[in-house]
Amino acid sequence: MYQIGTTLTQYIIFEQRNHTDATGEFTGLLNDISTACKKIAALTSKGALVGVLGAAGSENVQGEEQKKMDIITNDVFIEALENNGHVAALASEEMEAVYNLPADKPRGPYMVTFDPLDGSSNMDVNVSVGTIFSIIKAPKGTENPTADDFMQPGTTQIAAGYCLYGPSTMMVITTGKGVNMFTLDRDCGEFILTRQDVQIPEDTEEFAINTSNQRYWDAPVQRYISECLQGAEGPRGKNFNMRWVASMVAEVHRILMRGGIFMYPTDAKLRASGKEGKLRLLYEASPMSMLIEQAGGASTTGRERIMDIQPSELHQRVPVVLGSKNEVERLTAYHTE
Ligand code: AHM
Ligand code: MG
């Protein structure tokens, strides 16, 4: 256990001491990620003052409108990570292909996948947004890893986390030994440990789903939500509350703090447009699943554990059901009944 008040930098160094074979590369990488997130936190907090709101006038590989901040934060991440020899390649929700480092940059043993600003459309209305990241091992002896090298299931993640830009900026990290939360102290520029070994309650009375898609949902999701909505008079015998921020980072953070279930299931509308889900496996579903499982929660597609999925493409989308264990297991069971 660490003392509350430990800085993220101290925490990373202490963690390195526990690994006798550590080279310092991982420590350096987490430091670079933390630097990138601090820069993004500064930009998000200044917003309109520095002209970063609004559309960029372009689309990403997935045909979604890019916000100015999608592009700016993607560049901030690349710049923070490509110079210090800790990574071999990067992949981002905002870039079509794998980002290989320029020839003159030193290569390192890790690869990072990231969504530089998840929920970016919320930026314009001053609602919480976040950065999501996942760290995996790079193949040995490969100068320029390819998309194939990124096709690793979530169980191979070395670390995963997000930075939430909300009323306060928080870095939430797992290295596979629980989940710790750090709050950015802007006065000293450090992330400070404010909560450790987070545990998600197994039961909850709070669900998060975009109900505007209700008419497209499959039967198991219809049943689950309808039972929640019937409240104390229905089969669940208790009342439920609902939240939908439309920023996955904010939703996952709420669930880590007080429990809940978050769903972005597949539905008829997504399938009609050739998609299996809305959220991306490598940049969103996989890292969030590692955090949720490390905090004692569960994460599935409704049919299988997300961490077990063998990715088949960089921008693969999957249905997501995550949060308090008993509710996730219930909805997952409805899919197989
Ligand atoms: P983005 O990566 O393009 O920002 O999209 C992901 C976001 C999630 O943060 C959020 O859960 C979801 O999209 C919101 O979807 P919807 O617009 O259907 O409410
Ligand atoms: Mg996203």
Image (spheres, grey):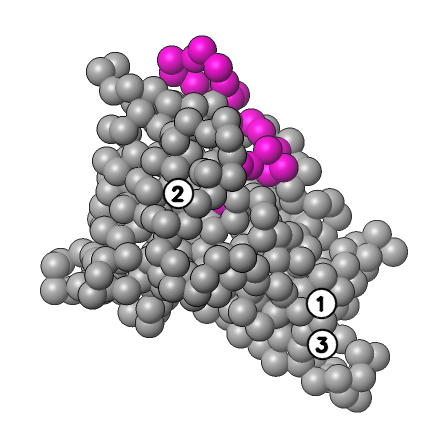
**Residue 77 falls in image quadrant:** top left
* Residue at image location 34% in from the left, 36% down from the top: 28
**Residue 211 falls in image quadrant:** bottom right
Mark 3 secondary-structure assignment: helix
What number is the disc on residue 202? Answer: 1
Residue 4 at x, y = what percent?
43, 65
* Residue at image location 60% in from the left, 38% down from the top: 154
**Residue 48 falls in image quadrant:** bottom left
User: Amino acid type of disc 3?
Assistant: Cys
| Callout in the foreground (2, 3) | 2
157 relative to 38, above or below: above
Mark 2 secondary-structure assignment: helix
Provide the residue span drawn in magenta.
Answer: 139-160
| Callout in the foreground (1, 3) | 1
For the residues marked 2 and 1, what is the alpha-carbon distance in whole angstroms? 32 Å
* Residue at image location 63% in from the left, 37% down from the top: 155
Asked whether mark 2 and ligand 2 are closer than 8 Å, the reply comes as no
Label 1 CA crowd tier, 10 Å (few <14, some 14–19, many 20+): some
194 relative to 302, above or below: below
Label 2 CA crowd tier, 10 Å (few <14, some 14–19, many 20+): some
Mark 1 secondary-structure assignment: loop
User: Amino acid type of disc 1?
Assistant: Glu
Front one among 296 and 288: 296
Label 3 CA crowd tier, 10 Å (few <14, some 14–19, many 20+): many
Asked whether mark 3 and ligand 1 are closer than 8 Å, the reply comes as no
Q: Mark 2 or mark 3, which has the lower sequence index?
A: 2
Q: Which residue is mark 2?
A: 13
Residue 202 at x, y = what percent?
71, 67
Q: Which residue is mark 3?
A: 228
User: Amino acid type of disc 2?
Assistant: Ile
